[in-house]
Image (spheres, rainbow, N blue to C red):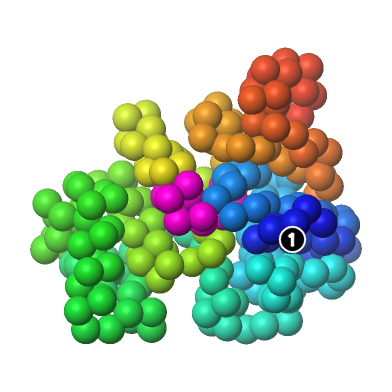
Amino acid sequence: TRSGAALSIAGLTVGYGGGPVLHDVSIEARPGEVVALLGANGAGKTTLLGALTGRVRATAGTIRLDGTDLRGMRTEDRARNGLALVPDGQSVVGELTVEENLRLGALWRHRGAARERAIRGIYEMFEPLERRKDADGHQLSGGERQMLALGRALIAEPRLLALDEPSLGLAPLVVAQIMRTLRETARERGLTVLLAEQNVTGALSIADRGVVLNLGKVVVDADAATLAEDSALRHAYLGF
Ligand code: ATP
């Protein structure tokens, strides 16, 4: 174990009843570090994020966040211990306004003036959200919805932010803005980010490290720059 690891997944085995889908997965990430979680369709990225939140049950291993093992905790207790997940598809409530969605995300973390300050903080991070603060969730563009999903997760001040394909279906400029904000937020707050992405180039452009899953196993754990430059590795596991 590297000292100061915020996230330490060790020996994690996860299945859905028909044999394991993840085998003995170990991943560590320091505070402020962005780790890209890569791999082909079906490699097990979504399953790993599900095991983090408790949606999918792990049969062996540990998931430590700042030393506390989350495995076995209820989902809401994992959140209180610093975990936030931005699922793919949408966690935004369509019938509520942007600001109401943010208020909901802040509910158990901040109250009164602190809550209003936290909401302003999210508007500073994602300026398009402030212009749309009175719009309903279902009126937002895909990019605005993804920013709001991120804002809702970040407003609770997690220690670990896990994202499932945040760039899916978004225009390149919007992807770039979201990636940049993730990078800056991780540095500024010492937030650990686990970024599951099919968009390998986009993810590696902001990641410190890349972890490649293949058939439910970690096959590569390398510096992001090394991984981006190693064409043999890319060909073998990432298909380009
Ligand atoms: P994608 O990018 O397509 O989501 P992924 O890397 O996230 O791929 P997973 O969705 O985690 O991969 O799937 C890993 C394996 O687990 C696949 O073989 C898949 O068929 C299987 N799997 C996923 N969800 C379930 C489920 N609810 N029940 C049974 N098997 C599942």
Question: Where is 215 relative to 75, above or below?
Answer: above
Drawn side of residue 44 relative to residue 81, left or right: right
Q: Split into 4 quadrants, where in the image is the C terminus?
A: top right
Question: Where is 86 relative to 201, above or below?
Answer: below
Drawn side of residue 66 relative to residue 126, left or right: right
Q: Position of residue 78 (x, y in %)?
A: 59, 77
Q: Residue at x 70, y 32 (%)?
A: 223
Q: Residue at x 57, y 45 (%)?
A: 34
Q: Position of residue 57 (x, y in %)?
A: 74, 73
Say few, some or many: other residues with alpha carbon within 10 Å of mark 1 (under 14 / 14 to 19 / 20 or more): many
194 is within the stretch colored magenta: yes
Q: Which residue is mark 1?
A: 8
* Whether residue 6 can be seen here: yes
Q: Position of residue 16 (x, y in %)?
A: 77, 67
Asked whether mark 1 lies closer than 8 Å to ligand 1, one says no
Q: Split into 4 quadrants, where in the image is the N terminus?
A: bottom right
Q: Residue at x 69, y 58 (%)?
A: 4
Drawn side of residue 177 relative to residue 162, left or right: left
Asked where in the image residue 198 lies, by quadrant, the reply is: top right
Question: Where is 202 relative to 18, above or below?
Answer: above
Q: Amino acid at mark 1?
A: Ser
The one of 6 and 171 positioned closer to us in this rendering: 6
Magenta region: which residues?
A: 185-195
The one of 139 and 231 positioned closer to us in this rendering: 231
